[in-house]
Image (cartoon, rainbow, N blue to C red):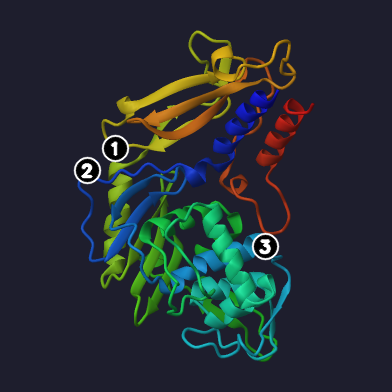
């Protein structure tokens, strides 16, 4: 039974984390776009495939791109309707600011809008103290999240991105972080917002924030994400855009011509790596009694589709799982195994397969791929956990 459990858990992991962990760099497949950046990366958000990278693992200062991590940690760990109070340490924080008053209270959700649209350093500190108990406590959460999602070249020392020794990341890591964060519907909504107003308890007028990210106005389909600048990090930018159902995110660090470079990078991704459908939902698998549990699409360059290989792994296959004698899966749960997909020998994802006529959980949607910060677990993940709980019970 122990071997069987390992197999089933191994099946669940790629399904739940597919948008996060499957990274197959396409650098060198075709000539990439030219940029003025010291470091750059382009990622397909759904699959996590890095489509272009220029010195992508070089550890550099990242300025306010830090706030991408601040926002996603706060969304996941906090409650959006909580009142966040501005402490003496958050008040009048140096650099970009919302000009919040000492002792002022604002909902976490509105504070997050101010954080991401206007890059308020005072908001970053207030959020950190509220969610983490202190800035130091929140930084621990930031670094824990970085470890969870596989950011191997990132370390955070504060929630705002002001220059500090030991505070750094890379273009590749920021691309992966952004892809992860964009699967959260709250984060996705905030960073796509051009203008936001919020109540001001101290004045007769409301706060009115215009997004600093010019890509939202310069590039067709743009829907995020964050600008950044310090005297040591120079200009930094993460942008995202969606066209024809495909979302890409671009990252540049130390780039004096970032708006134009991002347009070229995003054009490159959409032009050369469109999403290609590899499998349809409920598609019969040849010479078997199983069907696919969901569709699968992947960004592929011209000619790469023929390089995608598929391997069917059935959970009752003796050579794969060695289930103990007389142990069988409950037929009311028809999960039969998976199809592993590889591109040129690199694993790119898995598709669950089910016995024909059995229950198939709904396909994951973008908002189901990440757990929200308000205590609600996705319906898709809930369905999967119910299935596995039944199958793995003694």
Counting from the top left corner in percent of width and height, residue 355 is at: 63, 16
Distance between the Cα atoms at labels 3 and 2?
41 Å
Res 180 visible = yes
User: Which residue: 71% across, 40% down?
Assistant: 382
User: Which residue: 71% across, 18% down?
Assistant: 329
Distance between the Cα atoms at labels 3 and 1?
38 Å
Res 193 visible = no
State yes or no: discs 3 and 2 in contact (Cβ < 8 Å): no
Q: Quadrant of residue 361?
A: top right
- Answer few, some or many: residues within 10 Å of disc 3's Cα (few below 14, many 20 plus, some between 14 and 19): some
In this figure, which residue is indicated by the disc labeled 2? Answer: 30
Residue 287 sits above or below residue 385 on the image: above
Task: Kindly state the secondary structure of the residue where label 3 is placed.
Answer: helix
| The one of 1 and 390 positioned closer to us in this rendering | 1
User: Which residue: 69% across, 65% down?
Assistant: 78
Task: Kindly state the secondary structure of the residue where label 2 is placed.
Answer: loop
Mark 3 or 1, which is nearer the eye? 3
State yes or no: discs 2 and 1 in contact (Cβ < 8 Å): yes
Residue 194 sits above or below residue 385 on the image: below
Distance between the Cα atoms at labels 2 and 1?
8 Å
Residue 301 tag number? 1
Q: Earlier in the sequence, mark 2 or mark 1?
A: 2
Q: Earlier in the sequence, mark 3 or mark 2?
A: 2
| The one of 355 and 194 positioned closer to us in this rendering | 355
Quarter of the image that includes the C terminus? top right
Q: Quadrant of residue 256?
A: bottom left
In this figure, which residue is indicated by the disc labeled 3? Answer: 77
Residue 369 sits above or below residue 83 on the image: above
Quarter of the image that includes the N terminus? top right
Give left or right: position of 131 versus 223. right
Q: Earlier in the sequence, mark 3 or mark 1?
A: 3
């Amino acid at each position: 039974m122990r071997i069987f459990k390992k197999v089933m858990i191994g099946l669940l992991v790629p399904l739940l984390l597919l948008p996060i962990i499957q990274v197959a760099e396409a650098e060198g497949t075709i000539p990439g776009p030219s940029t003025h950046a010291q470091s750059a990366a382009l990622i397909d958000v759904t699959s996590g495939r890095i489509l272009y990278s220029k010195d992508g693992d070089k550890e550099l200062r990242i300025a306010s791109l830090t706030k991408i991590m601040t926002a996603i940690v706060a969304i996941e760990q906090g409650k959006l309707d909580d009142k966040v109070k501005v402490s003496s340490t958050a008040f009048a924080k140096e650099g970009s600011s919302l000009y919040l008053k000492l002792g002022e209270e604002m909902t976490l959700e509105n504070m997050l809008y101010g954080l991401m649209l206007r890059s308020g350093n005072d908001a970053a500190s207030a959020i950190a103290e509220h969610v983490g108990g202190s800035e130091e406590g929140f930084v621990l959460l930031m670094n824990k999240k970085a470890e969870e999602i596989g950011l191997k070249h990132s370390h955070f020392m504060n929630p705002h991105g002001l220059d500090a020794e030991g505070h750094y990341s890379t273009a590749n890591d920021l691309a992966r972080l952004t892809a992860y964060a964009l699967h959260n519907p709250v984060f996705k909504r905030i960073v796509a917002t051009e203008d936001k107003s919020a109540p001001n308890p101290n004045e007769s007028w409301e706060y009115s924030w215009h997004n600093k990210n010019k890509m939202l106005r310069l590039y067709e389909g743009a829907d995020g994400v964050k600008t950044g600048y310090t005297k040591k990090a120079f200009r930094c930018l993460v942008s995202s855009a969606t066209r024809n159902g495909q979302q890409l995110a671009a990252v540049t660090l130390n780039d004096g011509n970032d708006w134009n470079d991002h347009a070229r990078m995003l054009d490159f991704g959409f032009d050369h790596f469109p999403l290609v459908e590899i499998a349809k939902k409920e598609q019969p698998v040849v010479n078997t009694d199983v069907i696919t549990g969901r569709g699968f699409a992947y960004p592929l360059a011209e000619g790469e589709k023929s390089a995608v290989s598929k391997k069917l792994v059935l959970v009752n296959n003796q050579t794969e799982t060695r289930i103990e004698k007389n142990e069988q899966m409950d037929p009311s749960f028809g999960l039969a195994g998976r199809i592993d997909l590889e591109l040129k020998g690199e694993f790119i994802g898995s598709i669950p397969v089910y016995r024909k006529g059995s229950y198939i959980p709904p396909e994951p949607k973008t908002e189901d791929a990440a757990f929200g910060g308000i205590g609600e677990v996705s319906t898709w993940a809930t369905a999967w956990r119910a299935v596995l709980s039944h199958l793995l019970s003694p």
